[in-house]
Image (cartoon, rainbow, N blue to C red):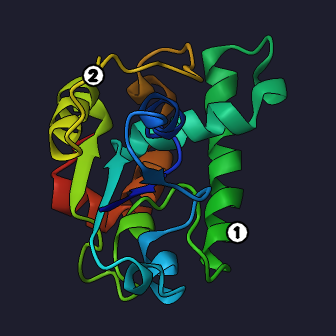
Amino acid sequence: MTNVFIHVPKTAGTSLSKTLRGKCAIYTKGHLTAYQLQRLDFFQECDNHFVFAFVRNPWDATLSYFFFRTKPLRRRRSLSQIIVVFERWLISTVLIASRRTSPHHIDQWAFIASQDRSKLLVDFVGRYESLEEDYDRLCDKLNITSPRKLAYINRTSRGPYQDYYNDSTRTMVSELNSELIQHFQYEF
């Protein structure tokens, strides 16, 4: 069995990769999408495979990505100033994403779905919001019985994601992640 981890950005992927390494055979290649692996005929090469990924509330994940990409821009700024910088960053990021053919880091659905976005290409999807429980379920599926303690890496310290959004930024993230929000019933 080949276990394939689709590393959706800002969903504890680094923590999952490092924790699973050595406990089971796992294939992960940067931030390739399930569709990209399918196009590379990766799944044809391994007859028996289990593909898994984790997703995260898109508003929380987008803010986490912003914090990851903009550390110098946020130094010594008030919350109201960060909200303005976040909106500008998000506008430019969404514009860039709309001009690309490859998925952008804040479009999680593109990592786990077919090119036409109509179906999931993964066998298991865990949620960041229930990370410990879903990690345990994943370990059951991967037949991991050794210690299941998940290592937390790259955590960001900030307030609740709702505090950083205004109506405009909330709508932008909603529109970019509509399939994810609908499929997993995410709410702001």
Q: Nearer the viewer, residue 74 or 45?
A: 45
Q: Nearer the viewer, residue 14 or 68?
A: 14
Q: Which element carries disc 2, helix, strand or loop? A: loop
| Number of marks in picture | 2
Q: Give the side of residue 130 with respect to residue 35, left or right.
A: left
Q: Give the side of residue 114 with respect to residue 159, left or right.
A: left
Q: Is residue 134 above or below residue 175?
A: above
Where is mark 2, residue-wise?
146
Where's the C terminus, which quadrant?
top left
Q: Which element carries disc 1, helix, strand or loop? A: helix
**Which amino acid, by three-letter code, is at mark 2?**
Ser
How far across and how far down the image is residue 15, in percent? 49, 29
Q: Is residue 166 visible?
A: no
For image coordinates 26% across by 33% down, the residue present is 135
Q: Nearer the viewer, residue 69 or 10?
A: 10
Marks 1 and 2 close (CB-CB < 8 Å)? no
Circle 1 Cα neighbour tier, 10 Å, few/some/many (<14 / 14–19 / ≥20) = few
Q: Give the side of residue 6 with respect to residue 73, left or right.
A: left
Q: In this view, does 55 lie above or below 31?
A: above
Where is mark 1, residue-wise?
96
How far across and how far down the image is residue 11, in percent? 44, 40
Structural distance between the alpha carbons of marks 1 and 2: 43 Å
